[in-house]
Image (cartoon, grey):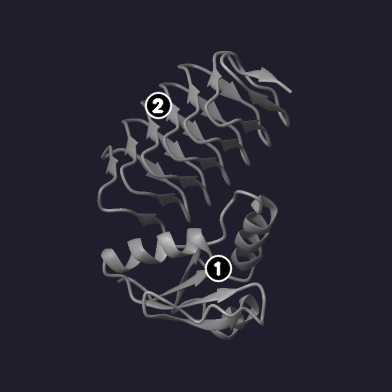
Amino acid sequence: MRLPIIVLGGGGHSKVLMNTLLMTSFDVKGFTTPDSEDQMKIIFGVKRLGADDIIRSFDPTQYKLVNGIGSIGYPGIRRELFYSFKNSGYHFENVIHPSAILSKDTTLLEGVQVMAGVIVQPGCIVGANTIINTRATIEHDCLIGDNVHISPGAIICGDVIIGDNVHVGAGATVIQGIRIGKNSIIGAGSVVTRNVTEGVKVVGVPAKEV
């Protein structure tokens, strides 16, 4: 049985998610924002409930959450909200746009968001609280960590392993068999042809550390 949804956040990413939830017939109870004085009151007919902490007045067995905080500029906030509410007993719904194509053996952990036009090929595992954004492609047998953002139009070739908290920029390409260490950033439009260590930023064609 589907539970009603409360969406965290009232910005652009939240708007995209609410559109997908409504398209797929979820009951969206409302959304929250970090700022108690936020002026955004209604999105697609869905009302703002208040600041984030109001969620704790809702029974975690009767509602599920969707993390509408985008990772660009706010990756720490996105992670912190996810784990804070998880530790309080709440669970996060996976959001999958109806135009996405996912292999039947794809494994999605909790709170994964798969946007319009995404393709995920066989043998892939996608970690919790991860975003696979518009028209990104994940080829066969990839392992994507927790709290990762695969940005619009990115291409992840086969047998790639991406660590936790990695950001792959828009239009980037990661060739087959590459390993990307956790907490790293792949710049937009980059082509990654070598393994990337933890906690670095790489940009360019081919991608180099900066």
Vertical arrangement, residue 144 with respect to residue 197, above or below: below
Asked if residue 145 lies left or right of residue 97, the reply is right
Vertical arrangement, residue 65 with respect to residue 188, above or below: below
| SS for callout 2 | loop
User: What's under tag 1, amino acid-wise?
Assistant: Gly
Residue 113 position in % (x across, y down): 43, 52
Quarter of the image with the C terminus in it:
top right
Quarter of the image with the N terminus in it:
bottom left
| Residue with the mark numbered 2 | 141
Callout 2–callout 1 Cβ contact below 8 Å: no
Vertical arrangement, residue 174 with respect to residue 92, above or below: above
The residue at the point 51 percent across, 44 percent down is: 127
* Mark 2 nearby-residue class (10 Å; few <14, some 14–19, many ≥20): some
Residue furthest to the front in view is 39
The residue at the point 72 percent across, 28 percent down is: 200
Residue 118 position in % (x across, y down): 34, 41
User: What's under tag 2, amino acid-wise?
Assistant: Asp
Structural distance between the alpha carbons of marks 2 and 1: 32 Å
Give residue 120's quadrant in the image. Answer: top left
The residue at the point 57 percent across, 60 percent down is: 69
Residue 147 position in % (x across, y down): 58, 46
Which mark is in front, 2 or 1?
Answer: 1
Residue 186 position in % (x across, y down): 60, 30
The residue at the point 65 percent across, 28 percent down is: 181
Residue 203 has which mark? Answer: none
Give residue 88's quadrant in the image. Answer: bottom right
| Residue with the mark numbered 1 | 9
| SS for callout 1 | loop
* Mark 1 nearby-residue class (10 Å; few <14, some 14–19, many ≥20): many
In depth, the one of 59 and 184 nearer the eye is 184
In the rendered structure, which disc, 2 or 1, sits on the residue that comes first in sequence?
Answer: 1
